[in-house]
Amino acid sequence: MTLTDKYYQLRIRTDQPVNDLVVGLLSNVGAEGFVEEVNVLSCYFAEAKWNPSFQDDVMKFLGKLKDEGKIAEFDVDVSTVLNQDWNSQWEESILPIEVTKNIAIKPSWKEYHGAAKIVIEIDPKMSFGTGHHETTRMMVQLLEKYIKGGEKILDVGTGTGVLAIAAAKLGAASCFAVDTDEWSIDNSSENIRRNGVAGIVNVSKNEIETVAEGDFDIVMANLNRNTLLYIGTELYKRCKKGGILLIAGVLTLDEKDLLDSYGKIGFSRLEVMREAEWSSLAFKK
């Protein structure tokens, strides 16, 4: 976690466990740390990254869950706190996880003793992409299905680099990974080297608009609803004819919006994968 004197703490209490959903929502907007208790989630933002709209977004999101009957009560409050060692608390809660029969993801400080043939080692440093969230797991499962070997892949919003690393270990010939956050670039570069795929995965601090168009066999983006709606046309331009697009970070309640939007752009739906409240979508150009 970045060393700074002051953090904003967004504390969320619900009567039913929805911590994973909120982590998925806030990881994509710059939350740097999470501390989980039973039905309580504390989310931490560096002062420079805090935006009051984050509280409004969480309130709207929890309101939707309440309307759907997923929760009955919730409370959200914001306070400022001094930096402390949240990282060590969080590290203790992260364990290796098998995302498929053949692929496991483990934090760098834990041992894995299972039977998975591919083991990806990640030092997430509080970033999104440890394999514990549904969106990461589903994207790895889709990559395992659609990578046949030798593909050229684009990873938009790489975060920890876990999906790019998975693609390389599954047989992709190359993967160009981009992110707009300098911290994510540093973290993903470290993880790429740790997993021995630096010769396959190239990571760069770029907007998708700067990426050359038209020749990627698989394009993937694990982001959030609004960003995915905004960059849909750009994703289409980067995907070659007959290529595959994989997207995640989509709540099931927003699934139709993404399917409709991407259908209008020109993508054909291949499949929808769902886990808990999340959907991952596969398209063909």
Image (tube, rainbow, N blue to C red):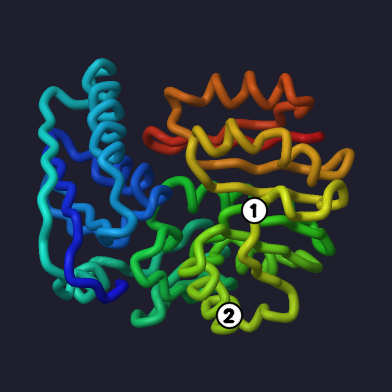
Q: Secondary structure at mark 2?
A: loop
Vertically, is 92 above or below 258? Answer: below
- What residue did someone put label 2 on? 195
Circle 1 residues within 10 Å: few <14, some 14–19, many ≥20: few
Residue 52 in picture, x, y percent from top left: 26, 41
Q: Is residue 104 visible?
A: no
Query: Residue 43 got which mark?
Result: none
- What residue did someone put label 1 on? 207
State the quadrant of the C terminus.
top right
Residue 158 in picture, x, y percent from top left: 57, 59
Q: Quadrant of residue 169?
A: bottom right
Q: Secondary structure at mark 1?
A: loop
Q: Residue at x 57, y 37 (%)?
A: 228
Circle 2 residues within 10 Å: few <14, some 14–19, many ≥20: some
Q: Callout 1, which amino acid?
A: Glu
Residue 174 in picture, x, y percent from top left: 78, 67
Q: Callout 2, which amino acid?
A: Asn
